[in-house]
Structure formats: C-alpha cells, structure tokens
Image: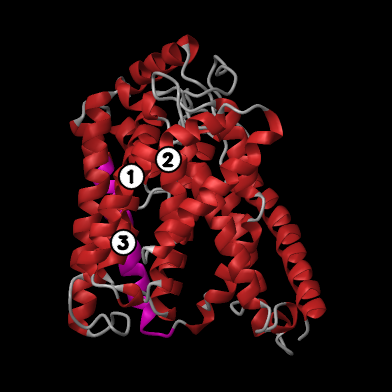
Amino acid sequence: MNAEQITSSVLVATGAVVALAAVLSALARRIGQPPVIGQVLAGIVLGPSVLGQLPGDPSSMLVPDEVLPHLGVLGQVALVLFMFSVGCELDTSLLRHQGRTVTTVSVAALVVPMAAGVALGWLAVGTGIAPAGASDGWVFPLYLAVALSITAMPVLASIIRDRGLSGTVPGTVATASAALTDVVGWLVLAGVVALAGPHGRSPAVLLGLLACYLPAMAALARPVLRRTSAIPGVLRDGPLVAAALLSGWATHALGLHAVFGAFLAGLLMPRAGDGSPDRELVSWADRMGGLLLPVFFITTGFSVDIGGLGPEDALLLPALLAVATGAKLGGCALAARLGGRTWRESAVVGALMNTRGLTELIALDVGKRAGLLDDRWYALLVVMAVVTTAMTGPLLTWWHRDGGDGPGQRAAHPAPAAGPGVPGHGPCEPGGGAAPGRAAADRAELWSARRSKS
C-alpha cells in the first residue's frame, strides 16, 4: 500500500470505531453501564473476535495488516495523553477525608489482590499454563499481581457521579483509595516491567535509572510545569502536550513504557494548597486525553481474539474472575468494615474498587508489549477487565434495591457544581464530578446514619 492508501485506511478505521463507540456508549449508559464498556466493545466488534468471523473477513478489509502498525503508533500517543490527564486529575485533598478508612482500604486494595495474583501466577507457572517465557522466575506472578490490583479512576468517577454517590462516605473513600493505589500501582508496574529486562538492559540498571528519573522530574520539571500551566489560553496547550510527550519519551528511552512518564508529568502538575487539581487544567487535559483515544480501542480490538480461547479456558476464565473479584471486592469491603463503615457502605466501596475499565486495558497493553503476556492471557485478562467493570452497576443496584438515599438514586440535595473535590469526568466519561461541599457532607452523614440502621 502506498502512503495515500494507508492514510485513507487510517481515516476509515478511525471513523468507524468512533461512530460505533458513540452508539455502543449510548446503549451502555441506557442500561446503567459506564460508557467505556461500549467503547471497549466497539474495538472488539470491529476486530477478529466478531467482524473477523464473518465470511470474507471484513475486519481485515477495514484494517489491513499494513495499516495496523500506523494505528498502533497513534494509539500509543493517545495513551500518553490519556495517562497525562489521569495524573492531572488525581486529587490528593481527598486523602484528608475519612483518613483511617482510606488508609485501610488502600492497603487492602493493593496487598490482597497482589497476594492473590502472585499465588495465581505461581500456580499457572507450576501447571504449565503461564505465557510462553514465564516458565520460571517471579516476573509473571508479579505482573499478574499488579494486573489484579488495578482500579480505573475515570470509570470509577463516572459511576460515582451517575449513582449519586458524590460527596457520600462510600464515594469519597473509594475515590481517595483509588487515587492512592493508582500512584503506587503504576510505580510497581514500572518496576515489574524493568524486571522483565526489555532492550537488553539488566533489571538493576533499569530500576536504578527509574529511581533517578523520579526525583529529577520532581526537582527539575515541576517548576517548569508550574510556570507553563500559568500561561493563559491556547498558548499553554502546546507546551503541556510537549511535556507529556517528552516525559513519555524519557521513560521509553529508559526501557519502560511511555505511559509511566506521561502519568508522572500529570501527577507533577501544580495543584491548590489542599492538593486539589486545577479545574480548568483538568478540563483541558480531559479533552486532550480523549482526542485520539478511540484509536487505542482499534488496536485493542485487533490484539485480542476472544474466539481463539479454547475449551480449557472455560475453567481458567471463571477462576480468574473469581480470584480477581474476591480479592479486590472482598478485600476492600472487609477493610472498609474494619475502618468503621457499615456493611452496606463497605460493600459499595468494594464494588467501586473492583472497577478496572480502561486503566486495566492500558496495563495489559504494557504487559503485552513487554512480552509478559501472550495472546491467550491477554484475551483472558481483557475479558476479566470488561466483566469486573460491567458488574459494578448491577451490584450497586442489587445492594440498594430497597430504595432510600443510596446509590442508584439521586440524593435529595443536589451536589454542588463540578469542582476539585472529586475528580471530574475522564476522557471516556463525559460530565463532571462534584465537590464535597457542605450540602454533600450533610448528605453523606444522613445517608450513613440511615444505612447504619438497616
């Protein structure tokens, strides 16, 4: 194919996935699911799992083999900008609320799923069902540990907003815990990728370079980012996009994935004195993060062939779902209960923390590119990410089917306008969050008091 044909194919494929994602996202919302479910399914439908099964293989006609690498590059740029926006949105001021419960849930959200992931990884290695190249060593079990501990902040924020949980105790605890575990989880994932030894470098060298890069970014880049973010209007856009891309390039040059550098650049963006992000900056980062993101769903859909899973996976997939859900939902719910919350509030926290969504897909993309996953495990974990995200809404509805002021119904007092208290909409979830003002705090206390009597 010549350059003009490749350009034409890229435009057609991008337009097709954007249109289908819009339709499926709207349908997902109508049935109480986050829009990211529809967007992920759009990529899978256009790929070999669905469209590729039809006579004549329309999937290959839509995206020829020569075009897929070009879409892959655009998809990686989309991920870099998205992870920059995720870093910008993290609201450290939430950590000051419900401190005891947040700390307990955050520790459980990391330790319990990671322990379960290591155990499952070792079992897979011992039984010979682990990915090729994972026959020995700790790398695959450690990677699986991180994969099971992921929580998708943008999707979680969307569910909290749609269910009327903004400003309530469970919503605040889940959001703050997810923010804390996001930071730790991505740093741990960076270390695991370093242990995989890509580009021929030893793990010790990669970990050393990463350890030097983190304080260097904090000391040198943060003042530059602070001055850049203060530039008014469109003059600010170019330098901030450049900062995200260059930081992504730096971690890629170190032998890690570019998303680590982009996430760190967003995390270092200036915030208010209480740690809340700048609302205007977050809104801008959201728009930039979602600009090319549909392209990533094409590459995801073409990288996974669910139809290729064999009969032996009929037992492995339910086991993977049981371990992932039991460790994350069960561990976080028990931790919230130990932190002083009621059982019903604790169950809501656990269900919210079990949401994996797009963030999990990015971690899976990182693992596949690092050689930690083969096609089979990639497909299994993609299904796990979609199912655990899709079950959040029905679980919240089931636990509050008796009515009241819980999730699934709007609170009697509307939340204040979108502000820095709770992260706003992510690139995949239109709409803003709500700051926990006085009305929201009163609503949270009222909701907690009513549920404690249940």
Give the image location of residue 136, x and y in percent: 18, 80
Residue sitting at 48 percent across and 46 percent down? 394
Q: Is residue 82 left or right of residue 152?
A: right
Q: Contact, CB < 8 Å: mark 2 with mark 1?
A: yes
Q: Amino acid at mark 1?
A: Ala
User: Which mark is on residue 216?
Assistant: 1
Farthest residue toward the bottom? 56
Depth check, front residue: 5 or 354: 5
What segment carries the magenta color?
310-332
Give the image location of residue 319, x and y in percent: 30, 68
**Is 292 situated above or below 301?**
above
Mark 2 or mark 1, earlier in chain: 1
Q: Amino acid at mark 3?
A: Ala
The stretch drawn in magenta includes residue 328: yes
Q: Is residue 319 left or right of residue 7?
A: left
Q: Count the labels in the image.
A: 3
Q: Contact, CB < 8 Å: mark 1 with mark 3?
A: no
Picture quadrant where residue 78 is located = bottom right
Q: Amino acid at mark 2?
A: Ala
Q: Is residue 267 left or right of residue 180?
A: right
User: Which of the two discs, 1 and 3, sits closer to the camera?
Assistant: 1
Magenta part mainly helix, strand or loop?
helix
Name the residue that disc number 2 marks: 221
Tell me the distance, in whole angstroms, between the alpha carbons under discs 1 and 3: 41 Å
Name the residue that disc number 3 marks: 322
Tell me the distance, in whole angstroms, between the alpha carbons under discs 2 and 1: 7 Å
The C terminus - image quarter: top left
